[in-house]
Amino acid sequence: MTDRDRYRELLEELREHNYRYHVLNAPIIDDNEYDLLYRELVDLETEHPELVDETSLTRRVGDPADDAFSPVRHRLPMFSLDNVMSFDELAAWHDRLASAYGGEPSGYSCELKIDGLAVSLTYENGQLTRGATRGDGTVGEDVTANVRTIKSVPLTLRGDAPAVMEVRGEIYLPVSEFNALNAQQAERGEQPYVNPRNTAAGSVRQKNPEVTASRNLAVWIYQLGYLDGGPSWSTHTEQMAWLSDLGLRINPANRTVKTFDEVVAYIEDATAHRHDRDYETDGIVIKVDSLAEQVEVGFTARSPRWATAYKLPPEEKTTLLREIRINVGRTGAVTPYAVMEPVFVGGVTVTNATLHNEGEVHRKDVRAGDTVIVRRAGDVIPEVVGPVTELRPKGLRKWHMPARCPFCGNPIVLPEGQAKAKCTGGYECPSRLREYLFHFASRGAMDIEGLGYMTVDMLLNKGMIRDPADIYLLTADQLVALDGWKETSANNLIAAIEASKHQPLQRLIVGLGIDHVGWTIARTLASHFRSIEAIRNASVDDITAIDGVGPEIAGSVVAWFGDPDNRSLLDRLEAAGVSMADPQPEGPTVPQTLQGVTVVITGTLEGFTRDSAKAAVLERGGKVAGSVSGRTDALIAGENAGSKLAKADSLGVPVLDEAAFTILLASGPAAVLGS
Ligand code: IVH
C-alpha cells in the first residue's frame, strides 16, 4: 500500500473512532490502540506534508484566525424560546395550541434544555465551514477556529451530505471538566471559575484556539436551520434522526411523545434526574413535532409559538446555620464562612459555604442560629442566599469580625479601601503559616510530592518547620523518628524536596505567595526578569512597564521584596540550594527581520514543512495567521495553493513563492515587498 493510500485509510479509520467515542459515546478500541493510530497519522503527515488533508484530526487546533469574532449574518434568524415557569403556564401554552389547531397537537419532542451557549454550525458539501455564536439572533460572531477544536463537532459529515446545511446546538462544558479545571486553578493558586456556562462561553471567545481546545468542551445539536438540498421530512424527530445519521451529536435523552400527559411525565422524570448527568440543564424544551403544525402557528417576533421552555429553578434548600467561622489564608486574608447542618442540594452535600467578607455577611444579614437558603445550581459553588427571617429565633446576634485572630491572637484589621480583613500576625499566625507552607509545596508551586496538607500540619505541630526554607533542612533520620514513617516514605519525601530545588523560577515565584501574583503573573515576571535578584532590584515603574502588569500587582511585588523577613527567607532558600534564576537562553539569536510582519502560509513548500516554515517566521519576530485578511502582509504560496490565493488576490495582498519567502526570512519585508 502506498503512503497516500495508508494515509487515506487512517483518516477514515480515525474519523470513525472519533465519532464512536465523542458522538456515540461507544468506542470499540481502547485509548492505547487509538493513540497508536493517531501517532501513525502524525508521522505520515510530518514525513509527507504534501498529503495533509485540511479536515484531518490533527488540524482541529489551528492558529488564531484573523477573522475571529468578525460579524456573521445568520442565513435564518436564531430565535430564542418563550418560558413557562409552572405546569399551569405549560397547560395554558398547550391550550392555546389546541385552540389554534382545533384539536391536540399530534405529538411533541421533549428535550433537555442545556445550560451552555447557542452555536450555529454551517456545513458545505459535508465540510464544516463556519461556527458562529447566536449574537442578537440576526448577527453573531465568527468562532470557527475555536468550534473546530470541539471533538464532538464533526469536521466532516458522514454519508450523503447536502450542499449547504446549517444546524443549531448548545456548546457546554461537562461538569467533570469544570471541576477538573477548578482543581487545576486551585493548585495554581488562581481564582476558581464560577460556573460551567460562563466558562464555556469564555472558552469559545478565546483568541487562541489552543486554549479552547484545552477546555474539552462538547456539543449537543438540537435544531436544523438553513438547508439547501437534502430530503424532506414531516417531523422534527425525523430531522434529528437524519442529523444523527450525518454524524452530529443528538442527545439520547430526547423523547418523542403523543400526549400532554406524557410531556408532564417527561418533565417530572428529567427534573428528578437533573443532577445525574455530566452537564447542567436549566429546563426542558417542548416542541410541536409535526413540521406542518409548526408552520401553521409560526413565530412571534422573537420566538416560535410551537415551542416553549419549561424553566427549572436553580435548586435551593433550607438548613440550619450553626456557626460563622473564619479562616486565615496564606496571604493573611480573613474569610468568614458558614458552617451548616449538612444539606443535599444540587446533587451534592453541602456543609460549608464561603461568606466572602464581613460586608457580605451584613448585606445578607445571616446570623448563627438562622434557617438559611442554600443554592447550588448553575453556580456550582454552593452559596448562602439569605436567612428565612420568619423562622429566626429571638435574640440572634449580628455577626462581627473578631478584633483578634483566633489562631494567633494578633489584631485583625480592615485595610483602607478593601473588603477583605487581614490578620496582622504574619507567619506567626499558625493558620496562615500552614496555608502558606501547603501552598509553597503544592503542585501549582514547588510541587513537592508527599508534602500535602496532613504532612505540613504534622511537621508544623512538631515544630520541625517554621517557614519554607526549613523544608530544605529536613533529614530522612528526622522523619523516620516520627510515628508512621518508614525509611522508604522518608527517603521519598527527601528526594522530592531535593528535586524541587531545581524548579523553574515561575514556580518559586508562585510559591512565595505574593499578593495578586498567581501562575500567570509569575510566568510574566520570570520570563522578563529571569532571576530573583533582578526582581528584588526592580522598582514599581520597572514592573508596570511590563505588558499585562498593573500598578497594584507591581506595588504588591515591591512591598513583598522590601520586607526584611521575606528577604531573609530568600537568603535562606538560596543557602539551602534552591535555584533562584532561570538559565539564560542559549546560542546566538536569529536576527529579528520580521518584527511586525504577519504572513499566511499555504500550499506545499519544498524546503520547509508547514511547521518549520512557521517556526522560521516566529523565530524572526513575525506572526503567522490562519487565514488571509486585510491585515496580512504577505501570502506565502507553495505548490497546490488553494482558495487562499484567490482571497489574497481579491484583497491585494502580495503573494510570495518559496524563493521570495527565503529572501523575506533573511532580509525582511523591504527586500521583497517594498517598503
Ligand atoms: S430550540 C427555534 N432546543 O435555549 C428553537 N434550544 O432561549 C430555538 N437551548 O438560545 C431553540 N437546549 O441556546 C432548543 N434542546 C434545545 C435547547 C435549546 C438549550 C437554548 C438555546 C436557545 C435557548 C432558548
Image: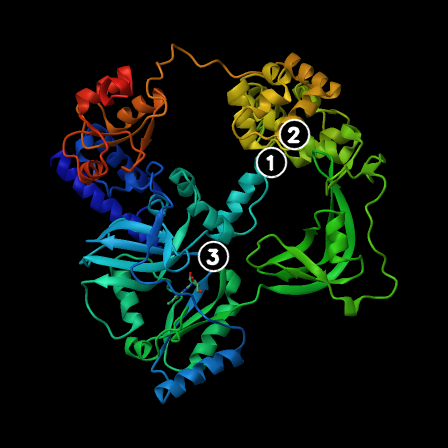
Judged left or right of residue 409, residue 29 is left
- Ranked by sequence position, the earlier of labels 1 and 2 is 1
Q: Residue at x 42, y 49 (%)?
A: 217
Q: Which residue is tagged 3?
A: 279
Query: Residue 189, labelled with which disc?
Result: 1
Please say if 49 is above or below 95.
Answer: above
Q: Residues within 10 Å of mark 1 (few under 14, many from 20)?
A: many
Q: Amino acid at mark 2?
A: Gly
Image x and y of residue 512, in percent: 64, 26
Q: Amino acid at mark 3?
A: Tyr
Asked if the residues shown at circle 1 and circle 2 are in contact, with their CB atoms under 8 angstroms apart, the answer is: yes
Q: Residue at x 66, y 23 (%)?
A: 558
C-alpha distance separating marks 3 and 1? 26 Å
Q: Nearer the viewer, residue 97 or 670?
A: 670
Image x and y of residue 283, in percent: 49, 67
Q: Residue at x 63, y 55 (%)?
A: 382
Q: Tell which quarter ligand 1 is in.
A: bottom left
Q: Which residue is tagged 2?
A: 513
- Ranked by sequence position, the earlier of labels 3 and 1 is 1
Task: Indicate if the residue with disc 2 has its beta carbon within 8 Å of ligand 1.
Answer: no
For this orientation, the residue located farthest to the bottom is 102
